[in-house]
Amino acid sequence: MADIGRYRAEDRRAIEALYRRVFGHDAADAHRLKFDWQHRSNPANPDGPPLIWVAREGTSVVGQLAAMPARVVVRGREVDGAWGTDAMVMPERRRQGLGELLLRQWDASAGVALGLGLSESSAPLIRKLRWAVVTVPCLVKPLTRRALRMPNWSVTANRLVSALTLPFVKVVGRPRPLAAEIHLVRRFDDRFTALWERIAPKFDLAVRRDAAYLTWKFATPPHARYTIATIRRGDQDAGYVVYRHIHEPLGRVTLIVDFLVDPDDEQGLQTLLGWVDREARAADSDKVRCFALHAGFRRQLRRAGYFPIKSSLELIVKVNAMDVPASFYEQTDRWHVTLGDDDYDR
Ligand SMILES: CC(C)(COP(=O)(O)OP(=O)(O)OC[C@H]1O[C@@H](n2cnc3c(N)ncnc32)[C@H](O)[C@@H]1OP(=O)(O)O)[C@@H](O)C(=O)NCCC(=O)NCCS
């Protein structure tokens, strides 16, 4: 039977080989590129060894689960959380309980165990463990007639829908004036820590978005290039939005990866969204896509021309550091979770 233990430097090559086998070459190259950033530069893991659980049989590595520490606010208390990523077990050793052992180790080490995105093989395991799974809603704002194309429709059906919906897309996607000053920045300064401290009590669950975390997460990742736009009022930063433009088979999409404003500052969010619209148009995007769990933010997104669509982004949450009632996992209206959490956006 395998032993589960913490990562040691000499495991690195074996983990890379297993990663290549399980997730493929491209994913393995990306994993190698971002290893130091993910495990050594994370401000929530200062000088500590990487928080990776390894299943070993003798000298062989047969499985791993990498955790990404983060400070998390849960109903007004800040606790140590850990995002579980890249769970993998060697194909010949699956269905023997190793995946469960790795997940339990991660869970036992975390004040809050969190995960974003389930795979075909991890979903049944999470169901078996009965951990809470919450869907993170997806909202889309159409900007061109190509925005409403669906991969499972015929070309004729797609053309017809594009033609019929064009007048509506033009109204929804019309440019609106910006109500405040927007700045593009390369890193987050301490004013964002002040913003976070000010508004953190308004969230029942959210990663602590202070300057150190935000700079690490969105200004320095080696595998993704983000644009960061901030809204400034006087000498205060009132919020930010992080986005990037991507190509998909049916068109170009601007992805809102993360954002933060006071949930009561509707003008702030509308201004940031108006900025993203302009940037998306300049980049020739057909639509803007945003994942947001917080009900107030979703209401404001709808008022800015976004529509809810089916989401397949699932969030796993298990709070260990404090007692929460079962209803906690059902009342998610004040949870702030976005695509930029975990290392889901790669
Ligand atoms: C996810 C993964 C790590 C699970 O590892 P594992 O060692 O097979 O997990 P376990 O043996 O502990 O499985 C526990 C339970 O999960 C469920 N399960 C696991 N694989 C399953 C499958 N293919 N079909 C149905 N149920 C499955 C079963 O309930 C199983 O319990 P059982 O065998 O008692 O019925 C492994 O399947 C894997 O490496 N998958 C590929 C990589 C991946 O997708 N990782 C997840 C990224 S989010």
Image (cartoon, rainbow, N blue to C red):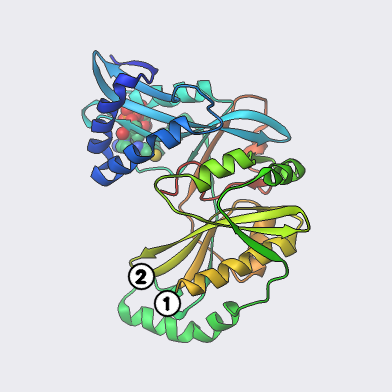
Nearer to the camera, 111 or 161:
111
Q: Position of residue 253 (x, y in %)?
A: 44, 66
Query: Image quadrant of residue 202?
Result: top right
Question: Type of residue at label 1?
Answer: Arg
Q: Residue at x 31, y 76 (%)?
A: 154
Nearer to the camera, 314 or 61:
61
Question: Type of residue at label 2?
Answer: Leu
Q: Which mark is residue 291?
A: none
Nearer to the camera, 243 or 116:
243
Query: Image quadrant of residue 53?
Result: top left
Q: Is residue 116 left or right of residue 121?
A: right
Q: Identify the element where label 2 is drawn.
A: loop
Q: Is residue 264 left or right of residue 230?
A: right
Cα–Cα span, label 2 and label 1: 8 Å
The residue under label 1 is 146
Q: Is residue 232 left or right of residue 53?
A: right
Nearer to the camera, 306 or 48:
48
Circles 2 and 1: CB atoms closer than 8 Å? yes
**Does the beta carbon at disc 1 come under 8 Å from ligand 1?**
no
Q: Position of residue 210 (x, y in %)?
A: 64, 40
The residue under label 2 is 250
Binning the other alpha carbons within 10 Å of mark 2 as few (below 14), some (14 to 19) or many (20 upward) gives few
For ligand 1, give the image quadrant.
top left
